Structures are given as C-alpha cells and as structure tokens.
Image (cartoon, rainbow, N blue to C red):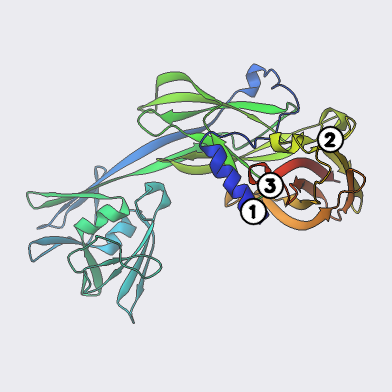
Amino acid sequence: MKKCIALLMSVMLAIGSGSSVFAQESAPSAHTKNETLDVAKMYRVSHELIMDVNSGQAVLDGRNLSLDKPIMKNGRVFVPLRTLRAIEAVDLLMLDASTQQVQVIMNSELKPPFEQLFFRVGSDKVYMEDGSALPGATIAKPFIAKGVTYIPIQALTYLGISPATAKQKVTLKWSNKVIELLQPKWETDKDSTTFTMLYQKDMNTPSVATALSGGGWVGGDDHAKVLKKDILLDGRHYNRIEFTLPLRPGPNALKITAVSGGEKSLSVMRKVSNESTSPIRLSDEGKKYIAFDQSASGYVRIPQGGSIDIAGRVVAGNEKLGALSFTVQQYVDEQAVESNPYKDIKEGKLPIQDQGFTGSVKLQHKGYYLVTLYSADNVPAFDRGAWAEIVVEVY
C-alpha cells in the first residue's frame, strides 16, 4: 500500500502538482563554481547499412562487411535476423525450434517502439512477450533458408530501424541514443546540489528524478534552465542545461531521464558535520497534522545495534488523528542502477497517545537508512502519503 501511494505521488509531481514535495530544511545554499559541473552528455550516434541484393556486398558506416545477402521473395525483401546481431542492433536472438519462433531483444540504446518482439516462421503476425499479436501489424511471412531465419524489412520499423530499397540495394538506418556519464558520483556539504549536462539540441530535453521512499521517482524540469545553446562539440550541436535539486543527508540517488535518450543513474553524497543543522523533513501535508521539537534531527548517527527514538506531537485541531505508520529502508547504492535504491527492512505503527506519538527503531547493520512516517488512515485522501523523513547512519 505504501508503495502504491508513493508511485501515485510521483505521477502527480511529474505533471507539476508539487504538493507532496518535502519542504527543504533551509533555502538552497550558494554554490561555488567548482560545484557546478557537466555530469553527463546525451547524444545520438547514427548508423547506415547498405546491402546489395545481387552481389551481397554490405557497407556499414563506410566500412565493408561480410554479411548474408538479402533475399527477394514474392516481390518483398527479406533480411537475415542474424544480420541485426552482426551490426550490434540486437542484444539477443533466440530460436525456439519446437515452435519455430524467434525472440528478438533489441539494443536498448536504439530506443525502439518495442525492445522485445517475437516472429514466427510462416506467420504474418508479430507477437509480444505475453503471446498476443501486435495490433494492426501484418507482415510478409518469415521463413528459414539453409538454416537462416529471414524476416521482411518492413518488420524492422517495429524494432527502431528504418528500411528503404532502391536500385537493387537495401538501406537500413538507425541510431543509438547515448547518455554518457562524465561524473556519475560526487560529494557536497550543501543541502542542495547544482550540476549541468549537455544534450544534443535536436533531442528531447532531459530531466532529473529523485528516489522516493515508497519505491517511486519524482522529478521534472521545473528547476532546470538552459544556460547555453548551440555548443559545437565532437561534430554535434549541444545545449547545456542546469539542474538544482534538494538533497537528503547521506547518499542521494538521482536519475537522468529523456524520452529520446533513456536513463542513467547518478549518486550524490551529502556530508553533514553537525546533526543539529538537519531538522526532520516534513511534507506540506504532514505539517497540517504533526510537528516535532526544534531539537529533533532529521539526520541521526548511531552505532551498530543502536536505536533511534521517534517522537512528535499532533498539531492542534487534529485530536482524532489515528495511528501513524512508518517504514525503515536501507539505501543500497548498487540497486539504484536498476531500480529504486531503498530496500524495505521493517515497518510498524506509532499510536497516538496524549496528542503525541513515540516509537523506537533498532538497527543492526552498518549503512544508511531512511525512516519514513506515513499518514493516518482517517485523513482525507488528498492528505495521505509520506509525512516525514529521518535519515539514519549506522556506523
């Protein structure tokens, strides 16, 4: 349930709602010049393969290749599926001999309409992973000749490759969309970080997302600005865009995303020398219902096997507030590459007594943990979700 709430929050925030963003502990700190850096470069690498139907000669990006030549059949041009592997356009080709079905998983950098499709010998349909036929797709039937599987070039459009024929030559065009990380990790002692990246000017503008405690991501380009346009570099024209994002104490997983370029992960470590300078982060919704003493810290360091106490009070006017719930999650840096970095450890309830709540969490292993307090069940739907966060470092 917590994960569903967090994912819903991320969708709302992505379209500009912003109502559940945790309030920053203070105004964004000034940044020195050496804190602003190009962390990534997003660009397109175009490819062209020309094959002669008669001679079989193949030229990839100006280089001669030895490939199986295309075949003309019933007025249609077919190419061997293994040609796609030879030109590194696919990550996997797998033939199921019993069903005469070929699984095709494309190189993710192509950003094709479908990264995975299935072709069946003798069938004019294209199939998806669940076994259903791709709606509206009818192709010339694939076949096998001398142990090689051929598909019609028209089917390549579903895989992100543009085919064309002229004067007995077949031309295939595609491009790899690359996000090259120049600085995947860095540290700061500020409560926010500012960085820049370059993106090819004719590609979609990138955005940066931050990991939510419940499993989702939240982000956009609301706090982004293009600093410079038409920067000529490596034969391409780039724009430089700047992002400024608030940081939790400890490690922060960020994700660069773009419709045309995929996604890549960044990691920013916020160093905190004085725990008292990091108050508990409260969401706008949480501020309506609960409060903490000014001395309560949003960043706590404890030894292995130690405990942290969670204590707060109910804001006046909310005397009927029900029990709060909480989760404890460990930050796993390696997990951030493929998914949300927070791994569930435990969860519990904080009953309301005498207009306050108290609880204790014991942690056995070294690392960084995120303790999240969630809303009571008896509040309006628009006020539900994550209300407060505490970061714990176990040393």
Residue 75 visible in image = yes
Point out which mark residue 213 bears.
3
Point out which mark residue 65 bears.
none
Residue 255 visible in image = no
Label located before the other in sequence (3 or 2):
3
x 83%, y 36%: residue: 315
Q: Position of residue 54 (x, y in %)?
A: 9, 58
**SS type, badge 1:** helix
Amino acid marked by disc 2: Ala
Question: Residue 78's image quarter?
Answer: bottom left
Whole-angstrom CA distance, mark 3 to mark 2, is: 27 Å
User: Within 10 angstroms of label 1, few (less than 14), some, or many (20 or more) residues?
Assistant: some
Label 1 or label 2, whichever lies nearer to me, is 2
Amino acid marked by disc 3: Ser
User: Within 10 angstroms of label 3, few (less than 14), some, or many (20 or more) residues?
Assistant: many
Point out which mark residue 3 bears.
1
**SS type, badge 2:** loop
x 26%, y 56%: residue: 156
**SS type, badge 3:** loop
Whole-angstrom CA distance, mark 3 to mark 1, is: 8 Å
Q: Position of residue 348 (x, y in %)?
A: 81, 56
Front residue of 59/268: it is 268
Q: Position of 345 compared to 80: left or right?
A: right
User: Within 10 angstroms of label 2, few (less than 14), some, or many (20 or more) residues?
Assistant: few
Point out which mark residue 316 bears.
2
Position of residue 24 relative to residue 321, above or below, is: above
Question: Residue 43's image quarter?
Answer: top left
